């Protein structure tokens, strides 16, 4: 059987880093050389692969919407030449990039799998080899028609994943959606989880940086703090509220949000809880938000919500359309 071909877009991250006097830093050429010369990656059961090393390689804390665009354009330009795509990325903002790519790509019929590691390949006990091997194997052999994130033997929907452990191998969780696949002795696809395969031409939407505020509520948050964020030149505000979407009923606080909403700022309510849905109809404290034009983010992760806002605000859409689409399920990012 003809061996499949995988394109690896290597953006940086711990996986290819080396120690320096300032801590870990990306090391040019090191990962590519290690992988190309490693017998495991060249076994017959593995796909053929090409690694495109980005210049400069970056720690993912330096990622920006411009980088998401570079990655999306890179994959688009190679889309016909390969059977699947792996994006090597730092873990710190991996869930943001996976979410952003999930919105930028429409009608994917080939896998795009984002992965990386917690310990560099250059160090003892690295999780890099197993993550990359599995991601390549899955990208070559499984019908994953969406952007996903592979880590620690689990494949997650990209826009459902979040970094949940700073220094464990199980760095990612998908609190509101079961993994798409588990990699044990056998690879097990979880029934009914994969996105459907739609045979339409691939669309790639461009994303530009957008001014979006994130307000994490806490008991006693002052009006001045809220005002300083909301009265800036933001186009959208993500409100991280309590429980099922509740906030203080202080009229001054609500008035600031109401005026912003009337000015056209899209205000989305997400819960601070790791798991579960926003339901503003549950308590009077949530209902007050609903009444002033705040919309529900349901069970979206912050990463999905922020990148979805970038995606929608980058297009020439009416504010009402954006409000509407934020509450729609576009790429499996929310359940209503
Ligand atoms: N494990 C990692 O990859 C962390 C690193 N700081 C990064 O995100 O690039």
Image (spheres, rainbow, N blue to C red):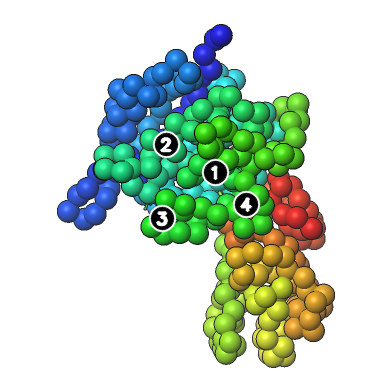
Mark 1 lies on a secondary structure that is: strand
Circle 2 residue: 130
Tell me which label, 4 or 1, sits earlier in the chain.
Answer: 1
Tell me which label, 2 or 4, sits earlier in the chain.
Answer: 2
Instruction: Quote the CA–CA distance across marks 1 and 3.
Output: 14 Å
Instruction: Quote the CA–CA distance across marks 4 and 3.
Output: 19 Å
Instruction: Quote the CA–CA distance across marks 2 and 4.
Output: 22 Å
- Label 1 near label 4: C-beta < 8 Å? no
| Tag in front: 4 or 3 | 3
Q: Residues within 10 Å of mark 1 (few under 14, many from 20)?
A: many
In the shown orientation, is residue 67 left or right of residue 307? Answer: left
Circle 3 residue: 168
Q: Quadrant of residue 284?
A: bottom right
- Label 3 near label 4: C-beta < 8 Å? no
- Give the residue drawn at x 43%, y 23%: 50
Instruction: Quote the CA–CA distance across marks 4 and 1.
Output: 13 Å
Mark 2 lies on a secondary structure that is: helix
Q: Residues within 10 Å of mark 3 (few under 14, many from 20)?
A: few
In the shown orientation, is residue 156 left or right of residue 168? Answer: right
Question: Front-most of 268 and 150?
Answer: 150
- Give the residue drawn at x 56%, y 32%: 186
Question: Front-most of 126 and 317?
Answer: 126
Question: Which residue appears farthest toward the top when viewing the image?
Answer: 1
Tell me which label, 3 or 2, sits earlier in the chain.
Answer: 2
């Amino acid at each position: 059987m003809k061996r499949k071909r995988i394109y690896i877009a290597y953006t940086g991250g711990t996986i290819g880093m080396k120690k320096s006097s300032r801590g870990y830093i990306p090391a040019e050429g090191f990962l590519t050389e290690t992988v190309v010369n490693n017998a495991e990656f060249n076994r017959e059961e593995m796909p053929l692969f090409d690694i495109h090393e980005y210049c400069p390689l970056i720690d993912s804390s330096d990622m920006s919407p411009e980088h998401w665009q570079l990655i999306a354009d890179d994959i688009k330009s190679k889309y016909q030449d390969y059977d699947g795509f792996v994006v090597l990325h730092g873990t710190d903002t991996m869930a943001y990039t996976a979410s952003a790519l999930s919105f930028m790509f429409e009608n994917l019929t080939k896998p795009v799998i984002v992965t990386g590691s917690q310990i560099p390949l250059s160090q003892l006990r690295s999780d890099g080899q197993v993550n990359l091997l599995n991601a390549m194997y899955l990208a070559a052999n499984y019908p994953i028609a969406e952007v996903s994130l592979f880590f620690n033997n689990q494949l997650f929907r990209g826009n459902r994943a979040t970094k949940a452990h700073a220094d464990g191998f199980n760095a990612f969780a998908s609190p509101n959606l079961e993994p798409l696949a588990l990699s044990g002795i056998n690879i097990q696809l979880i029934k009914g989880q994969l996105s459907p395969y739609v045979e339409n031409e691939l669309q790639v939407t461009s994303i530009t940086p957008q001014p979006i505020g994130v307000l994490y509520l806490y008991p006693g948050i002052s009006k001045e703090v809220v005002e300083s964020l909301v009265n800036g030149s933001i186009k959208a505000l993500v409100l991280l509220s309590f429980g099922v979407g509740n906030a203080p009923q202080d009229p001054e606080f609500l008035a600031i949000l109401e005026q912003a909403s009337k000015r056209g700022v899209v205000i989305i309510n997400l819960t601070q809880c790791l798991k579960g849905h926003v339901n503003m109809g549950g308590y009077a404290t949530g209902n007050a938000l609903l009444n002033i034009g705040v919309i529900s983010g349901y069970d979206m992760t912050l990463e999905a919500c922020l990148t979805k806002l970038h995606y929608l605000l980058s297009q020439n859409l009416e504010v009402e359309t954006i409000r509407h689409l934020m509450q729609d399920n576009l790429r499996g990012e929310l359940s209503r």
